[in-house]
Amino acid sequence: MPELPEVESIRRMLKRSVVGRTIVAAKVTEPRLRRRVAPALARAVVGRRIEGVGRRAKYLIVRLSGGDAIVVHLGMSGTITHRESRAGIDRAGSGNPPDGLSGQVDSAHDHAVLELDDGSRIVYNDPRRFGLLKLIPLDGLAASEELRALGPEPLSRAFDAAYLAEKARARRLAIKNLIMDQRIVAGIGNIYAAEILFRAGVRPARRAGGLKRAEIERIVAAAPCVLKEAIGRRGTTFRSYRDSRGRPGGFAGRLRVYGREGEPCYRCSTPIRNLMVGQRASFFCPRCQR
DNA sequence: CTTACATCCTGATTGC
DNA sequence: TGCAATCAGGATGTAA
């Protein structure tokens, strides 16, 4: 579920609230994520200081003293929340979060908790368990299997028209699938692919290799516009996404096409359509997008 | 190599 | 109302 803007929003908030804190306790209560969380992880992070919180693609990277990073991927349904403590709360194991987050995040799916030296906690929650938690040495991070094949960040200069044109050349798959391929460009998922292609005026099912140069240029220009606007609103909550304080993102009301099947296009009033492209719902305006 | 598809898992929603 | 089918923001492994 979380795409680049959601992970970036969590990164910014987490950075402000946890950098400089030391992890005093850690536990993984459900290691069965998409890949099993290493049993040694919890023990290995205790006593370390949080030096920084970074992001690459949809991965959150929590840098620790001692030269390692906790790499987190939220999969489809993961959230990371930072919960202020109140004395005595979950020591009794009451199950309910003590800090007003109940009803927003179901604690039944809290799978990992880091307790910090100010008494607050960082909680990883993921009902579908498609996520990833892994401790990786910093000096091997870029070469790790998770990060090594990722394409450029869509907010970086490396993602330009010449690059995308080269990657699209002779490719027969739909342009929407191409820009959702993390090896091509990193961080775009189903919601933002739809929004970027709307802004660019290109139909999601168009074959990548058949796009004109001007269309490629419009896609490359649209991507940072859409992503930055979404980051500014702390991401999109379509269903369950919450930021690190448990709040929904504010971009849902700004979505131009995603989830709007049958509703009028804001630009031309034509009903938005939804076609399956590569097994994923793909919303577009049949008049504004060609 | 490229592309299509099933799969992991739970929960919310839709349809009968 | 109840139950089954369908779908969900992701990524990967397999097969064609």
Image (tube, coloured by chain):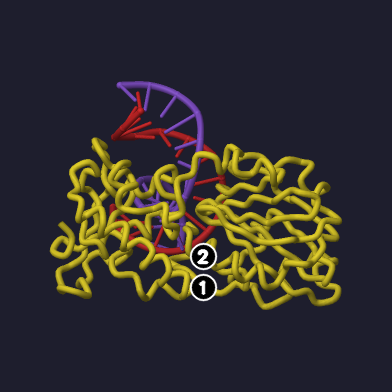
Chain colours: A yellow, B red, C purple
Q: Nearer the viewer, residue A284 or A199?
A: A199
Q: What residue appears at the point 18 percent right and 43 percent down from the top-left corner?
A: A210
Which residue type carries mark 2? Answer: Tyr
Report how far apart the C-alphas of labels 1 and 2 lie in the structure: 6 Å
Horizontal side of A117 relative to A237 (left or right) equals: right
Q: Secondary structure at mark 1?
A: loop
Callouts 1 and 2 in the same chain: yes
Q: Quick one: SS at disc 2?
A: loop
Q: Which residue is mark 2?
A: A241
* Disc 1 and disc 2 in contact, CB within 8 angstroms: yes
- Looking at numbered disc 1 in the image, what kind of residue is underneath it? Pro
A266 or A161: nearer the eye? A161
Image coordinates of residue A2 in percent, x first then y, are 49, 59
At 68% across and 68% down in the image, what residue appears? A82
Determine the residue positioned at 26% across, 56% down. Answer: A217
Q: Is residue A35 above or below residue A161?
A: above
Residue of label 1: A248
In the depicted view, which residue is nearer to us: A35 or A45?
A45
Q: Residue at x 55, y 47 (%)?
A: A130
Q: Chain of mark 2?
A: A
- Please state, as top left, top right, bottom left or bottom right, where the C terminus of chain A lies in the image: bottom left
- All told, the count of numbered labels is 2
Q: Is residue A225 above or below residue C2?
A: below
Number of residues whose C-alpha sits closer than 10 Å to that of mark 2, classed few (under 14), some (14–19) or many (20 or more): many
Q: Chain of mark 1?
A: A
